[in-house]
Image (tube, grey):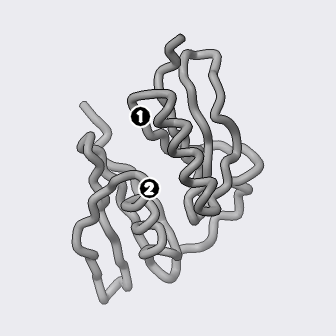
Amino acid sequence: MKIEHVAIWTEKLELLKDFYVTYFGAKANTQYYNPQKKFQSYFLTFDSGSRLELMHRPDIPKNTNDRVDKQHLGIIHLAFGVESMSEVDKKAAELKKDGYRVISGPRKTGDGYYEFETLDPDNNRLEVSALFIE
């Protein structure tokens, strides 16, 4: 069994799509639109075959959790794996240069990874990691 996809509600559908396409190599399908429900979505597919669904509907309420500086119950981040520690460093530098906040790292973790945390345009937490090799 595998996770088929993860979905994110957003008010910034096009911005979020462009972020994942630009920085994480996603490929977007043609936007789906249901005029009755005013529902719009994109499925983004990554090279690994995993998918992310970005969804918008005007009546979805804002998330009141502090997703930037605090933790909370529920899904807290998406993790992207890369092949090397240098790729982690390059991605952190690229996002930082383009104005995205790096919350922590790059750093070595106690469980054998080298990673950093950042935020997408909706302040969803993302990790980019590689196995730590000495």
Whether residue 78 is situated above or below residue 52 in the rendered picture: above
Between the C-alphas of marks 2 and 1, the distance is 13 Å
Query: Dot 2 corresponds to which residue?
Result: 23
How many C-alpha atoms fall within 10 Å of the one at disc 1: few (<14), some, or many (≥20)?
some
Residue shown at 54% from the left, 22% from the top: 113
Judge by depth and name the residue closer to the eye, 83 or 109.
Answer: 83
Say which element carries label 2. Answer: helix
Query: Dot 1 corresponds to which residue?
Result: 82
Query: Which amino acid is tagged 2?
Result: Tyr
Report x, y in % for residue 91. 51, 45
Looking at the rendered image, the quarter that the N terminus falls into is top left
Query: Which amino acid is tagged 1?
Result: Val
How many C-alpha atoms fall within 10 Å of the one at disc 2: few (<14), some, or many (≥20)?
few
Quarter occupied by residue 108:
top right
In the visual, does 70 lie left or right of 10?
A: right
Judge by depth and name the residue closer to the eye, 49 or 53.
Answer: 49
In the visual, does 123 lie left or right of 26?
A: right
Report x, y in % for residue 85. 50, 28
Whether residue 31 is situated above or below residue 132 in the rendered picture: below
